[in-house]
Image (cartoon, rainbow, N blue to C red):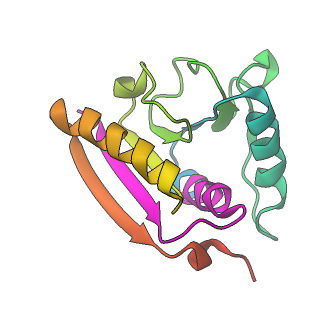
């Protein structure tokens, strides 16, 4: 059964949620996982694509956009639609709603910034998973933990 982890940033900061998602992707990649980063639109997917190149000096995460057939074999894919079947390990979920295909992943990482609107939507997703019996973990993190020096 899918394990769902909520990563709750202590407050909303400009780019904090994206930085946290980049760090999670980097950690999962180093551990040998295949990752799909789900964004809510094409603009967010493009922004995240650029962020993975620049978020940390000296680190490299091979990644691509899920919509491009040439990128399908990358260990990290970014997109706004259901990923290819090869990506069933880790889902980094950045959208307001629970995606229909979440349960095919071993782990789901829900990244939530500290804004009231984000927290309200995250509570709804938490209840959705809980009411269906999924294993849930909550991690409270400081937004400052994800700022690169």
Q: Which residues are magenta?
A: 1-27
Image-quadrant location for residue 138:
bottom left
In the displayed structure image, the side of residue 34 where residue 106 appears, left or right: left
At x 45% / y 29%, what residue is drawn? 88
Residue 1 % position (x, y) = 23, 32
At x 75% / y 83%, what residue is drawn? 149
In the displayed structure image, the side of residue 63 where residue 9 appears, left or right: left
Q: Residue furthest bottom?
A: 149
Residue 15 % position (x, y) = 71, 61
Residue 115 highlighted magenta (yes or no): no
Q: Is residue 131 visible?
A: yes
Q: Is residue 111 visible?
A: no
Residue 6 vertical placement versus 141 (above, below): above
Q: Nearer the viewer, residue 119 or 77?
A: 119
Residue 18 highlighted magenta (yes or no): yes
Q: How many marks can you see?
A: 0
Residue 146 % position (x, y) = 62, 72
Residue 81 % position (x, y) = 61, 19
Q: Nearer the viewer, residue 114 or 85?
A: 114
At x 17% / y 33%, what residue is drawn? 131
Image-quadrant location for residue 35:
top right
At x 43% / y 53%, what residue is drawn? 119
Residue 48 vertical placement versus 36 (above, below): below
Q: Nearer the viewer, residue 28 or 41?
A: 41
Residue 22 vertical placement versus 65 (above, below): below
């Amino acid at each position: 059964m899918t394990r769902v982890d909520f990563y709750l940033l202590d407050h909303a900061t400009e780019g904090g949620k994206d930085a946290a998602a980049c760090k999670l992707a980097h950690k999962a990649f180093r551990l040998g996982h295949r990752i799909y980063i789900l964004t809510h639109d094409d603009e967010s997917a493009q922004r995240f694509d650029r962020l993975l190149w620049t978020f940390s000096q000296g680190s490299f995460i091979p990644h691509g956009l899920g919509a491009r057939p040439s990128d399908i074999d990358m260990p990290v894919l970014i997109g706004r639609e259901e990923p290819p079947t090869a990506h069933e390990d880790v889902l980094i979920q950045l959208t307001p709603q629970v995606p229909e295909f979440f349960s095919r992943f071993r782990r789901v990482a829900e990244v939530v910034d500290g804004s009231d609107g984000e927290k309200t939507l995250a509570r709804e997703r938490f209840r959705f998973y809980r009411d269906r019996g999924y294993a849930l973990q909550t991690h409270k993190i400081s937004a400052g933990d994800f700022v690169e020096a």
